[in-house]
Image (tube, rainbow, N blue to C red):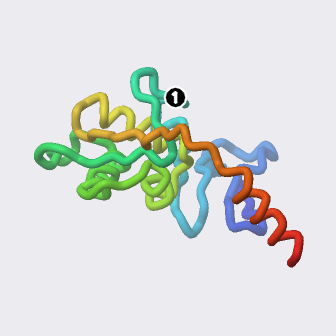
Amino acid sequence: MSSTADDGVAWYTGRGEDRAERDDTWYDEAAGPLVRPYALTGGRTDSTRVQLDLITFVVAVGAPVEPGRLPPEQVRILELSRRPISVVELGARLRLPIVVTKVLVADLIDSGLLVHRAPAMTDLTPDRQIIQAVLNGLRSL
């Protein structure tokens, strides 16, 4: 037997029902069956080769991929990456945790389907006078 919580998520109550009667599928009624994020990445939480920052830009290169060659999430990443896009924007558009997005993007980079550009690092330190002026302005509010 399954029960639906106030948030609309159905879950198995585990009250000894016959196995044939119980619903082992965990789902959100509005979204359909849910896939755990670790299932999309094979349990990986980090890329071993590519270190991606949230503001790293990626862009798809080469010809479109044959249907069925990649998981749907990676196909969507390639579609969204026809123009340069940041990793954090991809995660938001895919509605995936950023860790999962970074692993999927890194896999596409490793396979040569995406190229990336890390954000430029600067050695500029903020001017103390400007920070003090901003702080004084905030205090006067």
Q: Is residue 8 above or below residue 41?
A: below
Q: Please count the marks in the image.
A: 1
User: Looking at the image, which residue is at 52% across and 28% down?
Assistant: 46
Percent x, y for residue 47?
46, 27
In the depicted view, which residue is nearer to us: 130 or 11? 130
Quarter of the image containing the N terminus? bottom right
Q: Is residue 84 above or below residue 50?
A: below
Percent x, y for residue 98?
54, 46
**Viewed as shown, does residue 138 lie left or right of 96?**
right
Binning the other alpha carbons within 10 Å of mark 1 as few (below 14), some (14 to 19) or many (20 upward) gives some
In the depicted view, which residue is nearer to us: 73 or 28? 73
Q: Is residue 69 above or below residue 129?
A: above
| Residue 19, quarter of picture | top right
Q: Is residue 48 above or below residue 69?
A: above
In the depicted view, which residue is nearer to us: 70 or 46? 46
User: Looking at the image, which residue is at 44% across and 48% down?
Assistant: 87
Percent x, y for residue 11?
70, 53
Percent x, y for residue 49?
40, 22
| Residue 136, quarter of picture | bottom right
**Viewed as shown, does residue 59 lie left or right of 89?**
left
Which residue is most to the top? 48
In the depicted view, which residue is nearer to us: 122 or 34? 122
Which residue is most to the left? 63
User: Looking at the image, which residue is at 51% across and 46% down?
Assistant: 54
Identify the amino acid type marked 1.
Asp
Label 1 SS: loop
Give the residue at mark 1: 46
Quarter of the image containing the C terminus? bottom right
